[in-house]
Amino acid sequence: MLFTPTAIKDVLVIETKVFEDPRGFFMETYRRDVFAAQGINVDFVQINHSQSIRHTLRGLHYQVGHPQGKLVRVLRGEVLDVAVDIRFGSPTFGRWISEVLSARNKKQLYVPVGFAHGFCVISAEAEFLYYCTDYYHPQGEKGIIWNDPDLAIPWPAPEPLLSAKDRRNPRFRDIERDFTYEERRP
C-alpha cells in the first residue's frame, strides 16, 4: 500500500496494489499492521455504505462525544471527497483538502478525528463506503454548511442535492471548539 500525505498532515491518500487478470481484480483495502506502521493505529467498529445520484452532496459532517475517524472509498462511480480541519490550534485549522475518489482509481482517503467530511457525486451515481472508528450517535451529529464562504470549496455542483439537515448547518466561523489540536510526537 502507498500512503501519500496531503497538504494537511494527518489526512492520507491510500493506494493499494491491485491484482488484475481476465476474471477481474483483487486488492487489500485494509491491513491493521500496515496502517499502524503509518501511524493509523485505530479500530474500525462500523461500516457504512451509501448510494447517491449525480450532484448529491453529503456533508460537511462530523460527530462529537463519540468522534469518528473514517477510511472512505468509492465502490461504484466517482466523487469529489473533502476533509476540513476543524481542530482549533492546528496549523491547518480551517484548511481543506479534496481528492477525486472513484471505482476506477480505487483510491481511499483516511480522515482522522477532528475533521469535517463531505463528498459530492460527479458520476451518474456512486456507491460510497465508510469505515468508522466509533459508532454513529445522532445526538453528537454536527456539520458545516456546504457553501461556506470562508472555506470556499469549489464543489462540482453549483446547486447540489442536499438533505434538509445539511441545508441548516452553520457557517464554519460559528462552530464550537469541539476539537483541539495536539501535535503527535514520534
Image (cartoon, rainbow, N blue to C red):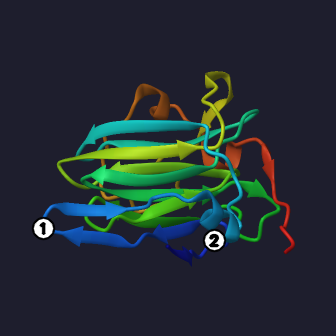
**Residue depth check, mark 2 versus mark 1: number of the one nearer the observer:** 1
Q: Is residue 147 visible?
A: no
Residue 31 or residue 79, whichever sits in front? 31
On screen, residue 150 above or below 51: below
Q: Amino acid at mark 1?
A: Pro
Pointer 2 or 1: first along the chain: 2
Residue type at mark 2? Ile
With respect to residue 137, does 19 lie above or below?
below
Neighbour tally class for label 2: few under 14, some 14-19, many 20 plus, Cα within 10 Å: some
- Label 1 crowd bin: few (<14), some (14–19), many (20+), radius 10 Å: few
Instruction: Report x, y in % for residue 76.
Output: 25, 51
- In this rendering, would 29 be left or right of 125? right
Q: Secondary structure at mark 1?
A: loop
Which residue shows up at 68% across the image and 29% down it?
140
Where residue 118 sits in the image (x, y, percent)?
48, 49
Residue where numbered disc 2 is placed: 8
Q: Which mark is residue 22?
A: 1
Q: Which numbered dot is residue 136?
A: none
Eyeballing the image, is 56 above or below 26? above
Mark 2–mark 1 Cα distance, whole angstroms, equals 38 Å
* Residue 122 location (% of width, % of height): 26, 55
Task: Indicate left or right for 14 with 178 as reference.
Answer: left
Task: Tell me which corner region of the image, top left, top right, bottom left or bottom right, holds residue 90.
Answer: bottom right
Q: Is residue 141 visible?
A: yes
Q: Is residue 152 left or right of residue 128?
A: right
